[in-house]
Amino acid sequence: MAILTKRIYDPPDPSDGFRLLIMRLWPRGIRKDLVSAWEKELGPSRKLLDDFHVGIPWAEYRMRYHDEMRAKPDLIGLWAERASRETITLLCGCKDESRCHRSLLREILGKKLEYRP
């Protein structure tokens, strides 16, 4: 199946499949029926978010986010397994897809699917 990414503020589409919100805080103005599940533990830690907002380099953010996700192998495995069976769209509020943890998580889950025993 596919792992897609989308901004939570973009309109839902049937092709989204299972819509997984991956933010620590619920996004303002979003109805709960617009997401299939909320997995806040897949969002960056508060410390990492704060550091990112004050300007740590993207490379450092990327490395630290990967480290945080490596500490959650069961959670990553759960969502990788689900992604192997159905389309999942990772949702968060970031405007810039190229500097957003949803793109990093898609990469992490994709690698987990590639190396499944």
Image (cartoon, rainbow, N blue to C red):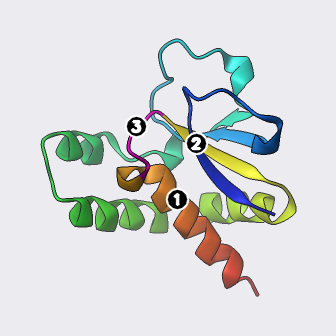
Q: Residue furthest right?
A: 85
Q: Is residue 105 above or below residue 29?
A: below
Residue 95 lies in magenta, yes or no? yes
Would you say residue 18 sits in the magenta stretch? no
Which amino acid type corresponds to the residue marked 1 in the rendered image?
Leu
CA gap between label 2 and label 1 equals: 12 Å
Which residue in the structure is indicated by mark 3? 95
Q: Residue at x 52, y 49 (%)?
A: 42
Mark 1, residue position:
105
In the image, which is nearer the foreground, mark 1 or mark 3? 3
Give yes or no for contact between labels 1 and 3 (Cβ–Cβ under 8 Å): no
Against 98, residue 117 (above or below) is below
Residue 30 location, x and y as percent?
58, 17
Badge count: 3
Give the magenta-colored segment's residue range.
93-97
**On the picture, is 38 further left or further right than 27?**
right
Type of the residue with mark 3: Lys
State how far apart marks 1 and 3 are (Cα): 16 Å
Cα separation, mark 3 vs mark 2, equals 10 Å
Q: Secondary structure at mark 1?
A: helix
Q: Residue at x 27, y 58 (%)?
A: 61
